[in-house]
Amino acid sequence: MVGQAVEKHPALAKEIVDRGHEATGHGQTWGDDISRDEPFTVTVKGKPFAVVPYTIRNNDIVRFDSPATTNATYLQDLKDDFDVLYAEAASRRRMMSVSAHDRISGIPGRVKLLEDFIRYAQKQKGVVFMRKDEIAKWALSAPNVPHES
């Protein structure tokens, strides 16, 4: 959810959360952070606030817009990015974000490519899949999470 939309429609935001949906998303005004491949914290009003980076490179809006890519190319790019981040994870914490929107990736062929990628990543030791809200909770409680002032 976008922060400004939540401020304008708090009852709807509460309903979304009450139904069990993930209530994370695009910052206050779509000011998503794309600066790194791991969560970090910042201080907001004197309290720690978790930032879970977003992705442009692995975003279906970007990849299937102009110029459009093929499902096979996108799948290979996801695997290649994963392989690099997985190798880096041997010496430091890494996270990979893939952004999929129902109106773009909700068609059968694209659902299949995402399923193929998930199966590929699941075969690797130590890989976990988490929602952004779960990552944020983890970042607020884990040791050695980067902090920006």
Image (cartoon, grey):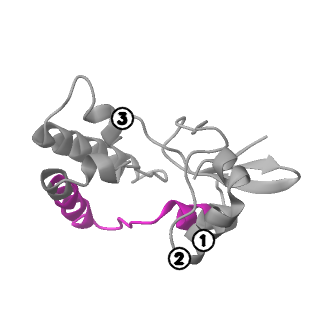
Instruction: Look at the picture and state if 99 lies above or below 127.
Output: above
Mark 1 Cα within 10 Å, few/some/many (few <14, many 20+)? Answer: few
Q: Quadrant of residue 141?
A: bottom right
Q: Position of residue 135 (x, y in %)?
A: 54, 62
> Which residue is identified by label 2?
19
How busy is the neighbourhood of tag 3: few (under 14 within 10 Å), some, or many (20 plus)? Answer: some
Q: Position of residue 149 (x, y in %)?
A: 79, 40
Residue at the image position 33 percent from the left and 32 percent from the top? 62
Q: Residue at x 22, y 55 (%)?
A: 114
* Left or right of 113 in this view: 40: right
Q: Which circle, 3 or 2, is nearer the viewer?
A: 2
In this rendered view, identify the residue nearer to me: 66 or 92.
Answer: 66
- Residues drawn in magenta: 113-136
Quarter where residue 139 is shown = bottom right
Q: 22 or 115: nearer the eye? A: 22
| Magenta highlight on residue 46 | no
Instruction: Give the residue drawn at x 19%, y 53%.
Output: 107
Residue 146 appearing in the image: no
Res. 6 mark: none
Query: What kind of element bears circle 1?
Result: helix
From the image, state whether disc 3 or disc 1 is nearer to you. Answer: 1
Residue tagged 1: 15
Give residue 130's quadrant in the image.
bottom left
Q: Which residue is mark 3?
A: 57
Q: What amino acid does circle 1 point to?
A: Glu
Query: How far, Cα to Cα, is label 2 from label 1?
Result: 6 Å
Q: Is the Cβ of the residue at disc 2 closer than 8 Å to that at disc 1? A: yes
Residue, far right: 46
Q: In the rendering, at what x and y percent does residue 145 appear?
A: 64, 55
Residue 6 seen in the figure: yes
